[in-house]
Amino acid sequence: MNIRFALGGLALALTGCVTVGPDYLRPAAIAPVQYKEVKGWKLAAPRDDAPKGAWWRAFHDSELHRLEATVAVSNQTLKVDEANYRQALALISQARAGLFPTVNFDPSLTRSGPPAGDLLNAQVTGAWTLDVWGRVRRLIEQSGAAAQVSAADLANATLSAQSALALAYIQVRQADALYDLLGDTIKQYQRSLDIAQNQYNAGTTAKSDVITAQAQMLAAQASQINTEVARKQNEHAIAVLMGKPPSEVSVTHRGLAESVPHPPIALPSRLLERRPDIAAAERTMKEQNAAIGVAISAYYPDISLSGAFGYRGDPFIQQIAGANPVWSYALSIAQPLFNGGLTAAQVEAARAAYEASVATYRQTVLTAFQQVEDQLAAIKVYDREIKVQLEAVRIARQAVQIALNEYRAGTQTFTTVVTAEATLLQDEESLLATKAARLSAAVSLIVALGGGWDVVDLPRVAQDGPADAAPAP
């Protein structure tokens, strides 16, 4: 083959490169114009200085911050996701290597008896499969999107672990608050027991009143001891989320926070860029779209160049050692003619996988909006419920005081006192549970809004640069 013809064919191949398969366009998602549950709820104004990564700072709890800061560093589950991300980055480099030729140097020296003599074969060989149809570029695009999926998965797993720790921390605080509440209740029951004992000593009441008061106080003491189960178990869960054994983590005793942060709510369309799980689903669509191009490229021929240059001969014959060069080059084309419909099936499977990823993306978006609406509704309802429960506790305390006064005066039985005190404890426990639920809903709302994450946090790993921006609403 004439060298000019080969070089001309190479130039034609390089200048005529195309990229087969569909270019990626983000499908539209089902996004509402506004949130249903925002109406009537007083929200904080959006702030540029709101916590971006350390979203838990909104609760203004120094110990929660101390615990949360360790999750992303030491949590073993997150280390798995982090290793998966590094593996995805390596696969990008692996795919990008297909754009370049491979060059090898494999010298050999063969010694044999006469008349053959010694033979030195020292050649540099190279091969290059031209990316004429864009198969390698689609592989790079696919690997880049896959790496961004891994990065988003890592962010989502981190957010989930941080959320789990915050919820466990609230459970610890709820157990502490319940312990303190039962401690105050035991003191109240002790006063009731003292009154019943004095009444019995004075001969104005029966021994059964004293026994009833003692039983009531012992039951409260047992309930107080029982709070340690939930506290210790949630404390252990916090330790594991931090990547530490339970013996190394202790949470100080403290009551439950009385107020919750109301994070600023942006337009629903911003949620598409704020949630790492949505970003992962969107990048998966791009990965599957690139896979279609990879499959389609199998319809086209592979064009390869190969060549060699070096020396072949007897290295001990000095007079010919420099005059025995060896060189070669070749251009080859491999065109598939028949494979039983394999390529068509692979293309169809790639298209089906892409369509599945589109449905998954849209369902992920819908689920995200549901989660935000759920927590907005929960916080609104809990706010109203707490107002009613505070009034119920206030009235129940009055009822206890009146019942005790009437019991002292001999105009009321001790059963009335016990009933009033039981009602008060039930109301106080319900109020405490609702406050804890409201705090948990606040955590879930912040997480549902993305926890300060943004799609711009995705690394620029693909050949075509950053993740495709979401269309403006």
Image: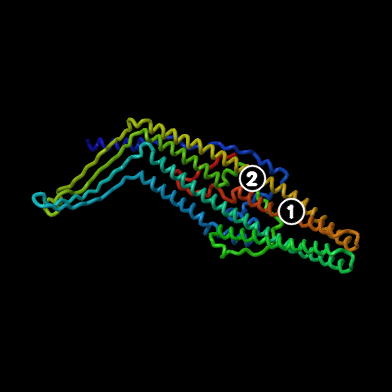
Tag nearer the camera, 2 or 1: 1
**Left or right side of 313 for 75:** right
Residue placed under numbered mark 1 in the picture: 430
Q: Secondary structure at mark 2?
A: helix
Quadrant in which residue 215 is drawn: bottom right
The disc placed on residue 208 is none
Return the x and y of residue 244 as percentages of the image width and height: 54, 61
Return the x and y of residue 378 as percentages of the image width and height: 69, 47
Return the x and y of residue 279 as percentages of the image width and height: 53, 44
Quadrant in which residue 418 is drawn: bottom right
Identify the residue at image location x=73%, y=56%: 429
Q: Nearer the viewer, residue 374 or 454?
A: 374
Residue type at numbered disc 2? Val
Return the x and y of residue 12 as percentages of the image width and height: 32, 35
Identify the residue at image location x=51%, y=54%: 78
**Left or right side of 440 for 20:** left
Residue type at numbered disc 1? Ser
Tell me the quarter of the image containing the C terminus.
top right
**Left or right side of 414 for 147:** left
Residue placed under numbered mark 2 in the picture: 372
Disc 1 crowd rating (10 Å Cα; few below 14, some 14-19, many 20+) is some
Identify the residue at image location x=63%, y=38%: 32
Q: Residue furthest front?
A: 207
Q: Residue furthest left?
A: 115
Tell me the quarter of the image containing the N terminus.
top left
Numbered circles on residues, count: 2
Inter-mark Cα distance, 2 to 1: 25 Å
Task: Answer yes or no: is residue 20 visible.
Answer: no
Q: Give the mark, 2 or 1, whose residue is nearer the N terminus.
A: 2
